[in-house]
Image (cartoon, rainbow, N blue to C red):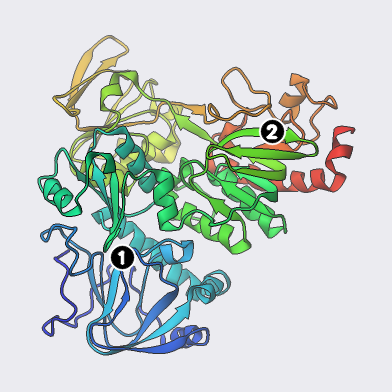
Amino acid sequence: MSDAPDPSDTHLPQTETPDPVGAFPRLSDEQVDVLLERGRRRRLAKGEVLIRPGDHPSSLYVVLDGYLLTTDTEPADDQRPADEPSMVGVHGRGRFVGDVGLLEGQPSFAFVSAIDAAEVAEIPVEELEAIVTSDPLLGEIILRAYLIRRSLAIGVGAGLRVVGSCFSPQTRELLDFVARNRLPHRLVDLDKDEKAEQLVRRLGATVADFPLVILGGARTVLAATPARLAAELGMRPPAPPTTCDVVVVGAGPAGLASAVYATSDGLSVYLCDSLATGGQAGTSARIENYLGFPAGISGAELADRGVLQVRKFGATLDIPATVMEIVEDDDRFRIVFDDGREVTSEVVVLATGVRYRSLSVLDRFQTSNVFYAATAQEARVCGDAPVAVVGGGNSAGQAALFLARTSSRVYLVVRAAELEAGMSRYLVDQIQNHPRIEVLLSSEVVDADGDGRLERITVRSAHGELRELEVGYVFVFIGAVPATDRLTVGVQRDADGYILTGSDAELAGSHSFGSARFSLETTVPGIFAVGDVRHGSVKRMTSAVGEGASAVRQIHEYLSKGRHNRVGA
């Protein structure tokens, strides 16, 4: 961490940045030759710029000779305080630059230039995608490095600058969007950052312009919303399809699995989500009980890998895109979005998942000190401040362990009398043996207080004892409700709002033909529900992925019989 150097400085040391975590592996000569077969050599003059923040790079660059400089800001960027720390790297032969955004169609968050005269291998992104998905060894080296770099950038707050008030609901909505989509960023808080006023004057911004986002260089999004920012970043398809075989609503593990298996089977798929890919699993710091990952995997990495598979097989991914209504239209479905767009499809898969309930006693701190996910983004905001995690499930346990890496104290507030009541044994063991985690069983949060920001919460035990905890942030994981409250669709649900499928749909008796043929089909023929939003589902990521895959087999059978025959069965 240091101030960004000037690439024209002849005294800049050409000593490579150490790589203790595998973010900058060195490719062998044989691996470089494989890449060169799909690209070309390119000579660079001293100080020549390859990539600027905000650019959409079209190629992977591998150093063949000389050194490249990488930093998360341009040396002449006047929209960033001069003393703000920056990620700086110097990379020689065999190393490559970029991060996972190159594969996901996102803009660069880095400045890349040649220190002296250099030579690079330039491989078009289309060829890189083919390598990542077809060459197991080389592809995994590149992908793993890209994912680690993105994680490091998020951890230090590189990338986007969100300028706004931490007490503004619009700013919080924007921060949630960039965090859940794993975009590196930092908040320039108008209420707390001493340099914010100076930056605002340079930008010439007015009250109506906030929140705003600085993408890099001179690119700024005024009065930013998730949809506007996504469009500026190129995250949404320029011309979404108006018709397809399958529309998948929700891009959590179940939705991603449905999209991957359906597209790999030759179906055209439109996958959309109102917030981000990954769902609740995407906010998990470490998933240790998922088959095939004995060392565990972060939810963010799992989501990014799923997105790359979706792109590989050709599904259309649209985020943020909120579905408001699903209408039966003859033998097809018409999906209506909140911006007025419509897509028609043969089949709909509802994979909207659930969302955690809020605590009313924390209402006045919702926009600044209360979180519903624990990732590197939230950990950076909290720093070493004491925090409280409320909940007794696996998500709460994973959050407590993750936050204990950086927080001086983590209080785990659990309503149940024992952790084992709702948490996997492997998490229980780790929590009970962690020196910075204190577990409060049979307890609930009954009050919160602070002067302008959260400073303490009050916890009451089952015996009526009150205890004040000095904490700056609270993470809430207290049960869930199905995320369908804004969606109008004529499927039957249980008393809690979960969607009925299979035998439960048959008992509802609203099928036009009297029963549901498929276990994941709802009370409307051709609409399937998978994952946590489905009544009776096992609220585990592995189960959600399995249901997403199983739904595709049922969809094929449904389509093979034709909707008219299906209704008359």
Q: Is residue 245 above or below residue 332?
A: below
Task: State the image coordinates of residue 171 (x, y, percent, origin top left).
Answer: 30, 39
Question: Label 2 belongs to which residue?
Answer: 327
At label 2, which amino acid type do we have? Val
What residue lies at 11% left-to-right and 50% top-to-bottom? Answer: 198
Q: Secondary structure at mark 1?
A: loop
Q: Earlier in the sequence, mark 2 or mark 1?
A: 1
Image quarter of the N terminus: bottom left
Q: Nearer the viewer, residue 303 or 235?
A: 235
Task: State the image coordinates of residue 299 (x, y, percent, origin top left).
Answer: 44, 49
Question: Would residue 388 be visible to someone looking at this image?
Answer: yes
Q: Quadrant of residue 329?
A: top right
Q: Is residue 274 above or below residue 123?
A: above
Is the residue under label 1 in contact with that under label 2 (CB below 8 Å)? no
Question: Label 1 belongs to which residue?
Answer: 53
Say whether residue 425 is left or right of residue 241: left
Image quarter of the C terminus: top right
At label 1, which amino acid type do we have? Pro
Task: State the image coordinates of residue 57 (x, y, percent, origin top left).
Answer: 41, 71
Q: Secondary structure at mark 2?
A: strand
